[in-house]
């Protein structure tokens, strides 16, 4: 059965979830399979956060561009 598409998580929410995952993993009390699932979820959150940071960096770069004659266009992130 295919997984449902999850709602995008805000950067701040993803960071909070990552902190919770790290705490649970560092406790050493999770069974191996559950720890692997938590780790996998953490990797997904980290990748999503990295993508959001890259998009924000791109937006800042566009806004700070020295080309005053460049046309302004709405920013649309790449859909994956």
Image (cartoon, grey):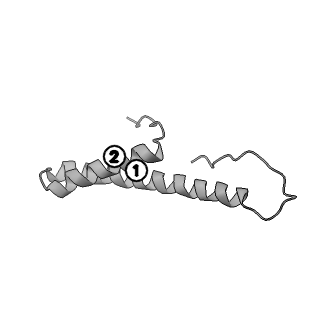
Whether the residues at callouts 1 and 2 have beta carbons within 8 Å, the answer is: yes
SS state under label 1: helix
Residue depicted at 63% across the width and 48% down the height: 77
Task: Compare residues 47 and 33 and report the one nearer the observer.
Answer: 47
Quadrant housing residue 43: bottom left
Task: Compare residues 32 and 9 and report the one nearer the observer.
Answer: 9
Gap between marks 1 and 2, in whole Å? 8 Å
Residue 74 vertical placement versus 63 (above, below): above
Q: Position of residue 46 (x, y in %)?
A: 41, 55
Residue depicted at 20% across the width and 48% down the height: 34
Q: Tell whether 41 sits left or right of 32.
A: right
Q: Position of residue 7 (x, y in %)?
A: 47, 36
Q: In front: mark 1 or mark 2? A: 2
SS state under label 2: helix
Label ID, residue 1 = none
Which quadrant: the N terminus?
top left
Q: Tell whether 48 sits left or right of 27.
A: right
> What residue is disc 2 on?
17
Q: Residues within 10 Å of mark 2 (few under 14, many from 20)?
A: some
Residue 66 vertical placement versus 30 (above, below): below
> What residue is disc 1 on?
45
Residue depicted at 63% across the width and 49% down the height: 78
Q: Position of residue 72 (x, y in %)?
A: 80, 50
Q: Position of residue 16 (x, y in %)?
A: 35, 47
Q: Tell whether 38 sits left or right of 56.
A: left
**Tag count:** 2
Q: Residues within 10 Å of mark 1 (few under 14, many from 20)?
A: many
């Amino acid at each position: 059965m295919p997984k449902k598409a999850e709602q995008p998580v805000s950067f701040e929410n993803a960071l909070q979830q990552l902190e919770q995952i790290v705490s649970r993993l560092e406790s050493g009390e999770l069974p191996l399979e559950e720890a692997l699932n938590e780790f996998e979820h953490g990797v997904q959150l980290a990748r999503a956060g990295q993508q959001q940071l890259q998009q924000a960096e791109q937006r800042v770069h566009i806004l700070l561009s020295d080309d005053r004659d460049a046309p302004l266009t709405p920013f649309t992130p790449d859909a994956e």
